[in-house]
Amino acid sequence: MVTVVTHPLLQHKLSLMRDVHTGVKEFRELASEVSLLLAYEAMRDLELAPHTLQTPLVEADFPMLSGKKLALVAILRAGLVMTDAIVDLVPAAKVGHIGLYRDPESLQPVAYYNKLPADIAERRVFLTDPMLATGGSASAAIASLKAAGAQSIKLMSILAAPEGIAVIQRDHPDVEIVVAAVDSHLNDHGYIVPGLGDAGDRIYGTK
Ligand code: PRP
Ligand code: URA
């Protein structure tokens, strides 16, 4: 399943991210804000249970988060800006990191780091990567999450290409995708068009 979050605040901020004139500081801030708005939607189905609390006036039952604990997992490096923002919303979540970069020639993901919460099998996992292009990186990251025992995974991306969505749906049909937009296509270098460029470079000011 693919959920495209069409909220006007998010769409406005995404358009600013696309603008080539948006500088590093503003791009990073926008990526954080967009991530929070994506998380708001991606976490819509978190379970609640009534808890008895004392307000200044009365004792009564109020909804609080219950059910499976959460894990945020970033695909390095660009996914880090997303987990850094979202963890403020869900501070009890554990945070994992999967280091992958895309070989510029083959466009195949190259793994260089993997550190996940030991109890990932018992947690709902929200995997973050701003760009779902060929889908190779996200598919490999999901495979390593599953190899570590993860059973409930949602992929959160800012931008997706139809090609990347098709790869995730083929390789991991159980994984829901939450994105801010699905663009037209990939160019010959595997970049999303119209896109926003290289997310990692724009977040960290490299290149
Ligand atoms: C970018 C992006 C994704 C990947 C998407 O990472 O952040 O992880 O490309 O491409 P794919 O869907 O075709 O695999 P990049 O390899 O540039 O690494 P970086 O985040 O370290 O810059
Ligand atoms: N990775 C990016 O950062 N941008 C793209 O358009 C494709 C892959």
Image (cartoon, grey):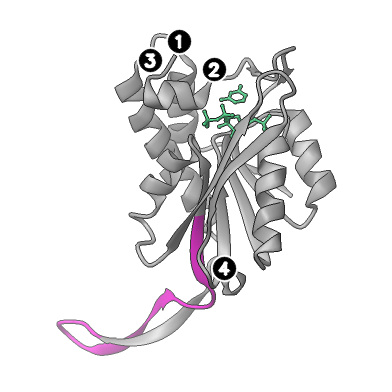
- Whichever of labels 4 and 2 marks the residue nearer the N terminus, that label is 4
Q: Determine the residue positioned at 68% across, 51% down.
A: 142
Q: Determine the residue positioned at 38% across, 26% down.
A: 204
Report x, y in % for residue 45: 57, 64
Q: Quadrant of residue 88?
A: bottom left
- Whichever of labels 2 and 1 marks the residue nearer the N terminus, that label is 1
According to the picture, the residue beneath numbered tag 2 turns out to be: 197
Ligand 2 position by quadrant: top right
- What segment is highlighted magenta in the picture? 54-72
Q: Is residue 124 magenta?
A: no
Q: Report the residue that reaches farthest toward the left.
A: 56
**Looking at the magenta stretch, what is its main secondary structure?**
strand
Q: Is residue 57 left or right of residue 71?
A: left
- Residue 197 visible to the viewer: yes
Q: Determine the residue positioned at 66% across, 25% down.
A: 103
Estimate how packed mark 2 is, as few (under 14), some (14 to 19) or many (20 or more) residues with alpha carbons within 10 Å: some
* Whether label 3 touches label 2, CB < 8 Å: no
CA distance for labels 2 and 1: 8 Å
Report x, y in % for residue 47: 53, 73
Give the amino acid at mark 1: Val
* Whether label 3 touches label 1, CB < 8 Å: yes
- The image's mark for residue 20 is 1
Estimate how packed mark 4 is, as few (under 14), some (14 to 19) or many (20 or more) residues with alpha carbons within 10 Å: many
* Whether label 3 touches label 4, CB < 8 Å: no
According to the picture, the residue beneath numbered tag 4 turns out to be: 120
166 vs 181, nearest the viewer: 166
CA distance for labels 4 and 2: 32 Å
72 in relation to 83, above or below = below
Tell me the mark number nearer the camera, choosing from 3 and 4.
4
Give the amino acid at mark 2: Gly
